[in-house]
Amino acid sequence: MINVDKHYDVIVVGGGHNGLVCATYLAKDGRKVLVLEANDAPGGASATAEFSDQFSVSSCAHWLFQLNPKVASELDLTKHGLALSAENLCTIALAEDGNHLTIDGDKLEGENISDEDRKAFVAFNQQISKFCKLLAGAFSRRAPKLVEGNFTDRITLAKLGFGMKLLGKEDMSDLMRLALINIYDVMEENFENDLLKGAISLDSLLGSHMGPRSPNTVYGYIYRRMGAIFGFQGPAVVQGGMGTVGKAMAAAAAASGVDIEVDAAVDKINIDVDHATGVTLKDGRVINAALVVSNADPKTTFNKLVGLSNIETGVARRVKTMRMKGDTAKLHIALDSLPNFTGLTEQQMGQRLVIAPTMNYIEHAFNSSKYGEYSAAPAMDISIPSIHDASLAPTGKHVMSVIVQYAPYDLTGGWTEENKGTFTELVIDRLADFASDLKDKIVASELLTPVDIEQRFHIHGGHWHHGEISLDQILMMRPFPGASQYGTAVDGLYLCGAGNHPGGGVMGLAGHNAAKEIIKRGKSA
Amino acid sequence: MMPHDETMILETPFHSRCLALCEINLWEDWKGYRSAAAYTSVEQEYFAVRSNTGVFDISPMIKYRFTGPDAGAYLNRLVTRDISKIAVDRVAYTVWCDDNGQVMDDGTIFHLAENDYRLCAYARCLDWLMWSAEGFDVTIVDETAEVAALAVQGPTSCAVFKDMGFEGIEHLKPFGITRYPFEGDEVMISRTGFTGDLGYEIWIDPTLAETFWDALFAAGKLRGIRAIGSAALDMLRTETGFLQAGIDFIPAEEAIRTGRSRSPFELGLGWLVSFDKPVFNGRKALLKEKQEGSRYAFVYLDVEGNKPAEHAFIYSGSKEVGTVTTAAWCPTAKTNVAFAQVDAQYGKVGQKLVAEIYYERELKWTRVMAKCTVIEGAVFNPPRKRQTPAPDF
């Protein structure tokens, strides 16, 4: 709650996970911090919502696989209620005939897998892991500036450069080559099995506006695999849904002295010529603070909260050209009982299931979205969390959460109820190709298009990552050149969301790094 | 509209009249328009402005129109000057910068009516203007081809206008705007110009351009009116200390090499920068520069002798400290003037410097090391430029 007698040092706009992490670190540093959250609960995209009577589901992100362990332990999230109901899950790439492929760490299980593929997969994982380790150092620090010769920045750059050198000649040239090509070509170089190639490709582009043949997908894959460096040997299911992550972080923040006000939408960040002075809430209340930290995505922050007219043209242009077009929908299904996926046991249905039978299947699905259409045969990432966590559905019943790729934000004709209905049907039909009795078991369903995600989570374009994760929008170029290192053109205004280095994925590092930077700048921040 | 690749160089609405007077057929390309460099002799044209009236066709000047509720706020963010202080029917000279505080161009803003402005610029910059419009309710139109314009400059210019029937024109103050009915339409007259003399600029619908020209030249016949080209204008503007974009500075968007662009302070235009207004492009960088100092100074030099110091290196002792951007012998002021960019520390008025001038006489090149002194500014600055009511010559 807002304490009217308290003179806040910092206002954090948005109580998403990065906002809460940032607020906690700042409070631990002795600052008086207020977090303002527009929704009725903190957590942002780490949310659990009841979408049908007694059926609840993680309404945005549905796996936990990248949470940074340093952040988790420093915030003592376990003590504050974070518990996993399942972890280190396998990924099962579904085949219509039931000859699925199971990816379990370095192991591949299923029919038609050649010894060459098995060996190549181990080698591939080792190489990706090296690249991840190289990047991990840079992830938990601010991104260096390229021009100014700041000592800290030089160390970060030197470590990256030296780390690349230490990879050895072959891996180093491979990294430089792979980073710029696409996952399709890399898969073709390495593997034969279509399901394997499809599943890895899907991981390289989930949440983005890219197909397997798009540049930047290799980086997308490396980015996703950072989770392994952070201790996740596969995705985890959070007890009570992802909302528990938000709750635990909010509890950690509160324990550090952060005040959190929910149902407090910020209308505008107040600026006096060139520095932030506080915020005005939608209800008209004005709260002053010398520092404002925005957990909102960069576009929402500058377009709506700051106003492009209050910043210089060059920055406004960069905000405008930043790429963040959501192309991913969520489908939530309430089930009377577990459906029968062809060839899967209940234990297997509790794993991460993906529908991405071939790379061309995904590419075809992507083609539609380029022209404002949803995929006729979408790729999917499926979770049935109620297998591990009975609290999400009435006894014996289940919930299914599906990430559906691709559903363009700017669908031709718009996301009308009719279009949503047709798309929902299409996705369910496709699911039923793998679980023939699915339709008989559906009690209710809810489709969240990128437009819904934008409205519900206040993310411009409904883009989970607060901006495409691609080589032109990472490190010192994230969110865009000139606004790096969490500071902005407006003095006293910082960004701490996933739109900043290193990016999104319920990792917590953007919030962590932003706080460290603000603390480092001390009084001048 | 003609396909771009089949379009010849454009002609201004006054072209038929310019063509008839252009005895020596000396044309040049001004932003895609055929424009006279000189009609007869440069000196005659120069003296027409200083002694009588000279007419320069400024129709090719890039003109943008801004309308809408945010037009004023938009321009205030775009340019360095405080536009809120420019009343309706007033004109302001200004520069605009990129985010790094580097000058993109200079030009004039005409406050035509409430929420209605015109910007006259050296370079096309619609792309930048459109990017700048994000977040503002403003409509931007390139009206370069929709407005015909003439500069009517010189001591007898006011009298010529009075003879044309523009009653009370003598009361128009410098940088003021007024309007008169003309042939069932309207002519807008501003007391502005690029010559440093008493003078006006007229703005009219292109369909009335030739009619206006004819009436103007008929009225001015006995007052020595004469069409002038860009060569004479260049002498005039040098004498009065006006900078020319593309010559005295490289517009920031056109500069390819780092360090070649300049800030307003480095062009001696710091007086155009207002920090007492809402955020504007370049503010942060300019504030920093103001506190930490500039790299360069833009200076006016009084150069010894009569050899124009064109492209000369400038020395302090044996140290090279800058270069000349514009130089001319100024006939009325009888002064040899040069504009130069020098290292900031050599920019103070009274600073003694040396210009290394090369000149050629019948294939023989000679070098002079001419002493020069940094002076305040315009060497030609007559009272008639400012007097209101304007004197009747």
Image (cartoon, coloured by chain):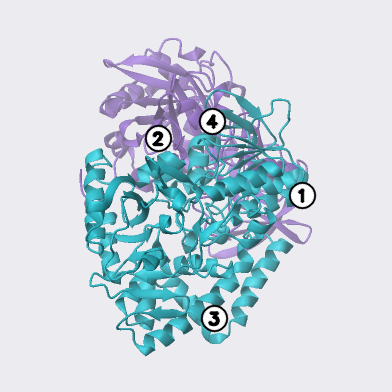
Q: Residues within 10 Å of mark 3 (few under 14, many from 20)?
A: some
- Whether tag 1 and tag 4 are in contact, CB under 8 A, the answer is no
* Label 3 – label 2 distance at C-alpha: 54 Å
Q: List the residue tagged with mark 1.
A: B345
Instruction: Please check whether the numbered discs 2 and 4 fall on a single chain.
Output: yes
| Colour cyan, chain | A
Check disc 2: other Cα within 10 Å, few if <14, some if 14-19, many if 20+. many
The residue wearing badge 3 is A172
Label pair 4/3, CB-CB below 8 angstroms: no
Q: Which residue is mark 4?
A: B76
Of residues B337 and A22, the one nearer the viewer is: A22
Q: Earlier in the sequence, mark 1 or mark 2?
A: 2
Query: Which is more N-terminal, label 4 or label 1?
Result: 4
- Using the numbered discs, state the Cα–Cα distance from disc 1 to disc 2 in whole angstroms: 37 Å
Quarter-wise, where is residue A261 in the image?
top right
Looking at the rendered image, the disc whose residue lies closer to the viewer, 1 or 3, is 3
Taking the image as shown, residue B386 lies to the left or right of residue B127, namely right
Q: Which one is earlier in the sequence, the residue at label 2 or at label 4?
A: 2
Across and down, in percent, residue A114 comes to 34, 87
Q: Dot 1, how many residues are within 10 Å of its Cα: few (below 14), some (14-19), or many (20+)?
A: few
Closer to the observer: label 2 or label 4? 4
Q: Quadrant of the C terminus of chain A?
A: top right
Q: Amino acid at mark 4?
A: Asn
Three-letter amino acid code of the residue under disc 3? Met
B336 in relation to A186, above or below = above
Mark 1 on the same chain as mark 4: yes
- Check the residue under mark 3 and report the chain it is in: A
Of residues B371 and A366, the one nearer the viewer is A366
What chain is the purple one? B
Point out residue B247 in the picture as x, y percentages from the top left corner.
53, 49
